[in-house]
Image (cartoon, rainbow, N blue to C red):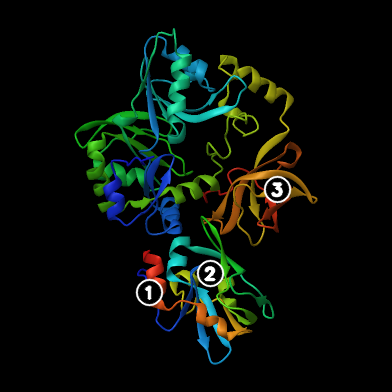
Amino acid sequence: MDLRRTPLYEQHAELGAKLVPFAGWEMPVSYEGIREEHSAVRRHAGMFDVSHMGEVEVEGPGALEFLQRVLSNDVAAVEVGGAQYSCLCNEEGGVLDDVFLYRLGGDRYLVVTNAANHGSDLAWMGRQGRGADVLVRDVANRYAMLAVQGPHARAVLGAALNLQLPARMHVSAVQVGRRPALACGTGYTGEDGVELLLDPEVAPPIWAELLDAGVVPCGLASRDTLRLEVCFPLHGNELTPERNPIEAGLGWCCKEATGFIGSEAVARARAEGTTEKLAPFLIEGQGIPRAGNPVLHDGEPVGEVTSGTFSPSLALGAGMAYVRAGLAEPGTELEIDVRGKRRAARVGSKPLYKKAS
Amino acid sequence: MADATYPDDLRYHEQHDWARLEGEDTAVFGITWYAQDSLGEVVFYDGPEVGASVAKDASYAEVESVKAVSDVIAPLSGEVIEVNAALADAPERINEDPYGEGWLVRVRLSDPGEADSLLGAEDYRKLLDS
């Protein structure tokens, strides 16, 4: 299958990025180096081409009712210009995807999906929307997406593009490169920042302008280390259709009273507890955990690592694992079997990396 | 190290390891520019201790970057007589200077003749281009 390229492909190639296949796209994994990119986002400002992510527009008099059914959070609580994180669940409460919802107008919403799930999300939403007074449209080709993240991201972005930026967890309609765009006060790094949904044609000049303004280009590898340090789950790793949001620690974005698809299963999991729970952990000493590594407690297998890496900020191996529910408490001692070597680890509290305030 | 280099005085194993022969029966081992570049920034090096024996074509150490782990293959057989202790605290030397300060082990060779099967720099470069 041919890999798709984002509107910024030429820019990545020109910068000498390492490009890898990811969810059907040819994406930059890093430019100068993962650690430099990681620390640019923690200390200054970095930008990620996340144009592979999907967008679905939901519009019509039945939009709220429809979204309330397919999304786990309380969509009625989102005001015009607001943003919200949600799970898309199946009837069994399994997580089909995790998405951001933006309310663009009275009856108009935008759902941002994960690239790997965009097609199946669309099909699912289309099926659930049958008979509802709502239009579900794939608008992924209409947008390039650029995440500008870091403590200085807003200042640099605001000055370089002369933009009024929305508050955190809000969205505003803006003009970028004389084209309509959306500025979203959201991100996936644990830092303040903005995600821009741009006309694909203006993405290259805007990228160049931000480069000139000192924003550091960052690839998927640092995006992964950044999100893992602050324990944001990744669909396909921590989140799957076989896991419910409760065991993944996402009970906070599930409002079962709305009656969303899967709400009964989620309510049951919340009331009865789950056999396993997602636990963030740090390796004590040497060793770098990787997805698939067995987790042990008192020598017994008790779970499996879903994501693991070297945490650049903490300079330690760090990860997340599903473990027996009783062993997910912070402070619990675990061992991670890293390629046959048992590495001491301890369950941490979220986020593993805490900003010095 | 920004540009690919493959010094002419080294012998290369096709698994992207090098050996620098010293005298009759000792050699220094390391990984090539290509190996460190594919791996990315090395954050962890787990090597053998002095006295360990290493066998040609078998793994004797692990290098790990932020995103991947890789076995290090011995280009020749023998016994480890010295290890680069500085790598424990500064594994990034493997990236910065793979043929110098990023060396891994010094080995007393059990069969110096094995070196004949290794590649010269030109043949190794051809292997990378193919």
Q: Is residue A73 left or right of residue A102?
A: right
Quarter of image, res B75: bottom right
Residue A162 location in percent, x, y?
Answer: 24, 40
Q: Amino acid at mark 3?
A: Val
Please state the horizontal and vertical placement of residue A248, each as a whole percent of the image: 62, 34
Callout 1 touching callout 3 (CB < 8 Å): no
> What is the CA distance from the residue labelled 3 to the residue labelled 2?
27 Å
Q: Chain of mark 1?
A: B
Picture residue at 45% right of the left edge, 47% below the top: A223
Of mark 2 and mark 1, the one earlier in the sequence is 1
Q: Helix, strand or loop at disc 1?
A: loop
Kindly indicate the quadrant of the structure image that contains residue A55: top left
For label 1, the residue is: B5
Front residue of this view, candidates B111 and B36:
B111
Q: Nearer the viewer, residue A256 or A126?
A: A126
Res A145 → quadrant: top left
Marks 1/3: CA distance? Answer: 41 Å
Q: Given the image, what chain letter belongs to the residue carrying mark 2?
A: B
Marking on residue A295: 3
Going by the numbered disc 1, the residue's amino acid type is Thr
Viewer-nearest residue: A34 or A357: A34
Residue sitting nearer the eye, A58 or A90 = A90
Element carrying mark 3: strand
Give the label on residue B91, or none. Answer: 2
Chain under numbered label 3: A
Q: Residue at x 43, y 79 (%)?
A: B120
Q: Where's the C terminus of chain B, which quadrant?
A: bottom left
Q: Is residue B6 something that shows in the picture?
A: no
Looking at this view, name the residue that lies furthest to the left.
A178
Q: Quadrant of the N terminus of chain B?
A: bottom left
